[in-house]
Image (tube, rainbow, N blue to C red):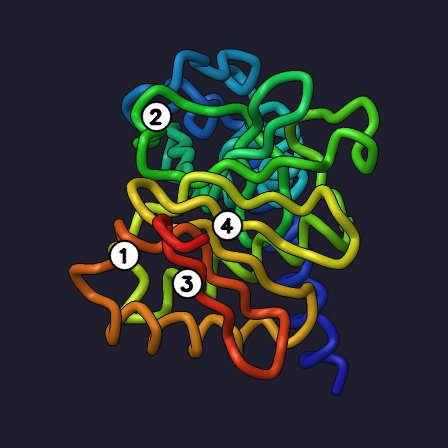
């Protein structure tokens, strides 16, 4: 029994010494920080620190606050002396027009636009000026109207019959109606409830009216039966 205790004590001392060596050794001091292409910061503040002394989760959160345009940031140790920082971009679903344009993703996070985001293909959500005050990049806004618009855009993007149409504006200004402005097509009006079923109905109407959408002024889906107004109708 005494021998076992002595052996365990010796093992513990070896472990403590080993950990101390890892934490003190210059061999494990960070010399390089590798980042993805396009990231301007070289994160030099990490250099010179012991690679095992860094709390990877804490540093990831810190860098995420600096770069809210990225959904996830992961730090990876590359022994003995390098750190790799991986950036996963947020997927912008639309722009939100406030005092300036912000991007918004499926998590309702606002973030600054980036140059290569394909601005011309993203719808613009309008009507939130009185709902979001002092908007800041990197902040999540759980606003009913914003959540509605984002959910509606996702439903359209997931619908095979609608996903290739260019919806330019999603207007949630009024409390009882959503307006969808289609490029080179009719205005779509729908209530703010049961949007998924109304999107499916809209898809059916688009399939049936293919080739004739330019002749339609608006489609109103707020009622039991859709109302279609032609441009030349009195």
- Earlier-in-chain disc, 2 versus 4: 2
> Dot 1 corresponds to which residue?
213
Do we see residue 75 in this rendering?
A: no
* Residue appearing at x 34%, y 73% in the figure: 205
Task: Return the disc, 1 or 3, that comes first in the chain's sequence.
Answer: 3
Q: Quadrant of the N terminus?
A: bottom right
Q: Earlier in the sequence, mark 2 or mark 3?
A: 2
Q: Mark 2 points at which residue?
A: 34
Q: Residue 19, located in which quarter of the rendered image? A: top right
Mark closer to the observer (4, 3): 4
Tag 1 or tag 2, which sits nearer the N-term? 2
| Residue that carries the numbered disc 4 in the rendered image | 180
Residue 41, image x and y in percent? 45, 13
The local secondary structure at tag 1 comes to helix
Mark 3 sits on what residue? 156
Task: State if disc 1 and disc 2 touch (CB < 8 Å).
Answer: no
């Amino acid at each position: 029994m005494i021998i076992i205790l002595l052996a365990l004590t010796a093992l513990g001392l070896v472990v403590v010494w080993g950990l101390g060596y890892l934490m003190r050794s210059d061999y494990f001091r960070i010399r390089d920080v590798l980042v993805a292409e396009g990231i301007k910061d070289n994160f030099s503040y990490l250099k010179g620190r012991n690679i095992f002394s860094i709390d990877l989760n804490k540093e990831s959160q810190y860098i995420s606050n600096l770069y809210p345009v990225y959904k996830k940031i992961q730090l990876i140790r590359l022994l003995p002396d390098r750190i790799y920082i991986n950036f996963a971009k947020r997927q912008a679903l639309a722009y939100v027009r406030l005092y300036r344009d912000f991007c918004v993703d499926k998590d309702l996070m606002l973030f600054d636009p980036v140059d290569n985001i394909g601005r011309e293909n993203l719808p613009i959500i309008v009507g939130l000026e009185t709902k979001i005050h002092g908007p800041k990049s990197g902040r999540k806004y759980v606003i009913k109207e914003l959540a509605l618009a984002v959910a509606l855009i996702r439903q359209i993007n997931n619908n095979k019959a609608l996903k290739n149409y260019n919806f330019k504006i999603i207007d949630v200004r009024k409390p009882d109606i959503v307006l969808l402005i289609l490029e080179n097509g009719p205005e779509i009006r729908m209530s703010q409830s049961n949007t998924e079923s109304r999107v499916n109905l809209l898809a059916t109407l688009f399939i049936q009216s293919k080739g004739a959408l330019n002749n339609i002024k608006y489609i109103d889906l707020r009622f039991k039966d859709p109302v279609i107004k032609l441009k030349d109708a009195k």
